[in-house]
Amino acid sequence: MRVYIYFLRVFVPLWRKDFHMKNINKNIGLYFIIDGAFTRDFLGLTKLAINADLKIIQYRDKNVEPLEMLKNAIKIQELTEKSDTIFIVNDNVDVALKSNADGVHIGQKDEKYENVRKLLPDKIIGLSTENIEQSLIADKIGADYLGVGPIFSTPTKPDAAPPIGVKKLAEIVKSTTTPIVAIGGINHENLENILETGVNGVAIISAILAARNPEKEVRKITSIIKRFRERNPL
Ligand code: TZP
Ligand code: MG
């Protein structure tokens, strides 16, 4: 009996945690960022992402108050929790925590990784890096994935660091082991060149959200990735 109670007390919580936790794997594919600067149809786009079987979406909203962000994050979370799609909140650790998102994405100027890890011990933490030095550090400290970029110049993030280009990206991929998502100016035309570097995924905002038909654009991008992966498994 005591053994049985011990089993329940130790393994059931572990199992429940695992059961509810969504894990990032190396086959990330399209990492779709739903950016409030381009759209307020967060739920429509979240449904689109879930229907397209995307592994990860991120909610980014630089120009609203945290409370507004939290309200939107809660609604997005309610949709994604019943799906396999991982939900990441950009920048705001508190919003990620209170909305019970699957994780948070932080930049070099946001709160330090070590502090965020203490607040979100079991969640996914992604870290933006802009060059090889930052990528090597992020690789060592245990971030769950790196968002490396901008690869190309992009009007979507006016304060971004200078673009690093495809060759530098390939160097970063070779020198690190953490899954890497490339970001910045990526679209269906330059996508193959980015994938050739060995990245695990591509994060895209404007090529989808500024397209006349975002759904068609998502389909175009995911089918390019699928075909590439069939030839180049990770
Ligand atoms: N970080 C580096 S570039 C960038 C971010 C958030 C913006 C990417 O947006 P787009 O429209 O896909 O170039
Ligand atoms: Mg940020």
Image (cartoon, rainbow, N blue to C red):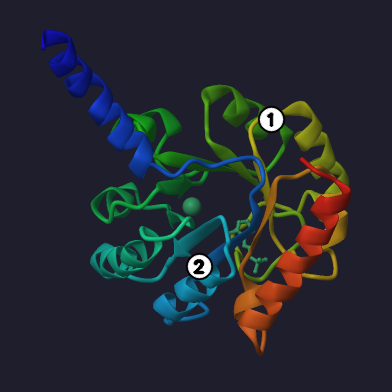
Q: Give the position of the C terminus as an image quadrant.
A: top right
Query: Which residue is rendered at x = 46% and y = 64% of the image?
Result: 60
Q: Tell me which amino acid carries mark 1.
A: Glu
Q: Position of residue 144 (x, y in %)?
A: 53, 36
Residue drawn where x is 66% and y is 71% of the image: 155
Task: Relative to 47, say whether 66 is above or below.
Answer: above
Which residue reaches farthest front?
Answer: 1
Q: Is residue 185 left or right of residue 208?
A: right
Label 1 packing within 10 angstroms: few (<14), some (14-19), many (20+) = few
**Residue holding disc 2:** 50
Q: CA distance from mark 1 to mark 2?
A: 35 Å
110 left or right of 150 in image: left
Residue farthest to the bottom, as pictured: 212
SS at badge 2: helix
Q: Position of residue 72 (x, y in %)?
A: 32, 70
The verdict on label 1 being within 8 Å of ligand 1 is: no
Crowding at dot 2, Cα within 10 Å, few <14 / some 14-19 / many 20+, comes out as: many
The residue where tag 1 is placed is: 133
Circle 1 or circle 2, nearest the eye: 2
